[in-house]
Image: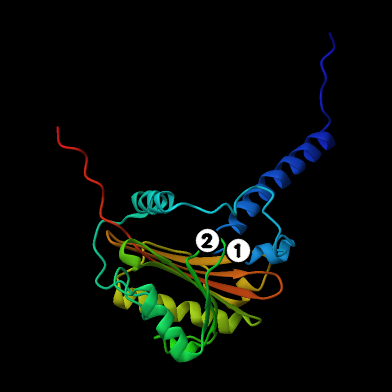
Amino acid sequence: MPRLVASRTTRRVLGSVLGVAVFGTALMGFAHTPPGRPLLNWMGLSMKGAGCPLGYDAQASVQSKEAARRGFAAAHRGAEPARVRPALGFLLEGTTRAQVLAWADEHGVRCTTPRTGADLDCEQVPATLLPLPGRQVAVGNLWLHFGAGDTLVSVIALSRSSEAAALLASYVAVNEALTQQAGPPTRRDAQQDADWLSGGLLRQTSTEYRFQDFYALARATNMGDGFLLTEEYRALPPPTLPPRG
């Protein structure tokens, strides 16, 4: 039987198709995470009333949320405790949902309960309401999650700007505050330049902080039609001890 040998062009086409498929799947998955959710608008998948074709928008139970939280902690826990666990002025495992709603009402911030994802979504939070003098952009969405006793366990903030320099200045301010308050970062991308960030769609620079009881992440992303700053602040539950024999 004669051997079928693919031409170089055919191999390149097949490789490109597979690469696009893998990238598309990864992009879709990222778009359904809290930091990547703004990509849904860019991809045209956020129509109201439309379900996600991959089922990412299914409502999670309380048990599955806690299991996911513990799984995240196990994968992202650091060796030392954080000096402080900053969370945009809120107290992780201390601030209650009622206190957040009272704060929002006092300052005219609109907070809603999303169908899926965060427990509260607070929109258009002015930079002046957040304890970070170097912040130059407002927080477009503040996603808050609550755990036992309806106390805050994580905060994710999304800020958008049409200017790379303004967004990167806020990114730098966030990292300076985290380093001063919580401790030094675990990982930091070398690229911290606005010109580099402006150079292409989905270019990113990020800094990660891992502690025993706290996780934080700051990420600046080129969205093509602007720039996105993602901040994560998470209280990590203590490790689960193995049963005593």
176 up-or-down from 242: above or below? below
Look at discs 1 and 2 and give the one toward the viewer.
Answer: 2
Determine whether the residue tagged by mark 1 lies in a helix, strand or loop.
Answer: loop
- Residue occupying image coordinates x 40% and y 50%: 63
Q: Position of residue 90 (x, y in %)?
A: 36, 78
Query: In the rendered image, is residue 134 in sight?
Result: no
Count of picture labels: 2
- Residue occupying image coordinates x 54% and y 63%: 34
- Residue occupying image coordinates x 39% and y 54%: 69
Q: Quadrant of the N terminus?
A: top right
User: Image quadrant of residue 39?
Assistant: bottom right
Which color mode does the image show? Answer: rainbow
Q: Position of residue 217 (x, y in %)?
A: 44, 66
Q: Position of residue 184 (x, y in %)?
A: 32, 69
- Residue occupying image coordinates x 27% and y 73%: 84
Q: Position of residue 35 (x, y in %)?
A: 54, 64
166 up-or-down from 205: above or below? below
Contact between marks 1 and 2 (CB within 8 A): the answer is: yes
Determine whether the residue tagged by mark 2 lies in a helix, strand or loop.
Answer: loop
Q: Quadrant of the C terminus?
A: top left
- Amino acid carrying label 2: it is Gly
Who comes first in sequence, dot 1 or dot 2? 1
* Disc assigned to residue 37: 1
- Amino acid carrying label 1: it is Arg
Q: Is 2 situated left or right of 91 in this image?
A: right
> Could you classify mark 2 by the number of other residues whose Cα lies within 10 Å: few (under 14), some (14-19), or many (20 or more)?
many
Q: Quick one: 133 or 113, which is closer to the camera? A: 113
* Disc assigned to residue 117: 2
As measured in the structure, the alpha-carbon distance from the residue carrying label 1 to the one carrying label 2 is 10 Å
181 up-or-down from 201: above or below? below
